[in-house]
Amino acid sequence: MTTLRTSTGPTRGQLEIQFEVDDEIAESGGWLVDYLNHSIHTGTLYQAGETIQIGWMIALLDHGALTEESPCLELWEPDFQTVPIQWQRGLNQTFRHLVLQSSVCESLQCEPMFPEIRSAGIVSPSFPHSQQFAMWREETSGSDSGWMFDHFTQDSSQGEFQSLYHIVLAKPEIVPFLALPVGSLITWNEIGVVVQLEEKRISSSDAPVLDGWFRKHTSA
């Protein structure tokens, strides 16, 4: 485990901020340290209890590392176990999701359009238990991410709004696709997964990132 930490010094009473990540993904966290350092130097003040968005995830600033010797705030992430969100130390899931979603967008040659984990999508009743499904993204508005989730029919008329966090708890297969932009369509069945955006198309048969994810979730 690697601990990464800001190095801003005593700036307007701002405590240093640190977070833990697994050693093999520690390099992915360097940009966040740089971002926090810069934002603090340019006037942002971070306090315990606030959240910041990292990709589609949110991280909680926790005071768990406050000690007299080295006062510091820590970034914690959702544990993906319970509703409502419970928090756990570190940002492992956060960076794994960020890399995965960015890789899918790169494979499709589009810019990520990250929703926020607490934003909503429309879910059909059959979606959480279906072995095959479709998900597509319409225009976003406020806390509506624009995502629709159905049992392969692209019919959301019987659906209801749920938070993306709640949907992922039931169907973790959707994680890689959540940063795809408006107009994206994803279909998943026993053969594989296909991602389409306008004239662009990738699938688990030609995109290694999709093939690995599909095999991981169909090997059981």
Image (cartoon, rainbow, N blue to C red):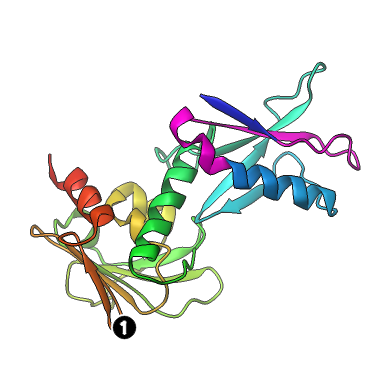
Which residue occupies 48% across, 28% down? 23
Residue plotted at (69% across, 50% down): 35
Q: Residue 136 at x, y = what percent?
A: 31, 73
Q: Is residue 148 above or below residue 88?
A: below
The answer to whether residue 17 is above or below residue 148 is above
Based on the picture, tell me whether residue 111 belongs to the magenta stretch. no
Q: Which residue is mark 1?
A: 198
Q: Position of residue 132 (x, y in %)?
A: 15, 61
Q: Nearer the viewer, residue 19 or 141?
A: 19
- The answer, for residue 115, to whether it is visible in the render is yes
Q: Position of residue 212 (x, y in %)?
A: 22, 48
Decide if residue 55 is on the left or right side of residue 170: right
Residue placed at 39% from the left, 62% from the top?
178
Classify the position of the C terminus by image quarter. Answer: top left
Q: Residue furthest bottom?
A: 199
Instruction: In the displayed orientation, state which residue is furthest to the left.
Output: 191
Residue at left offset 20%, top offset 46%: 217
- Looking at the rendering, which quadrant does residue 164 occupy? bottom left
| Residues in magenta, as a range | 6-29
**Tag 1, which secondary structure?**
loop
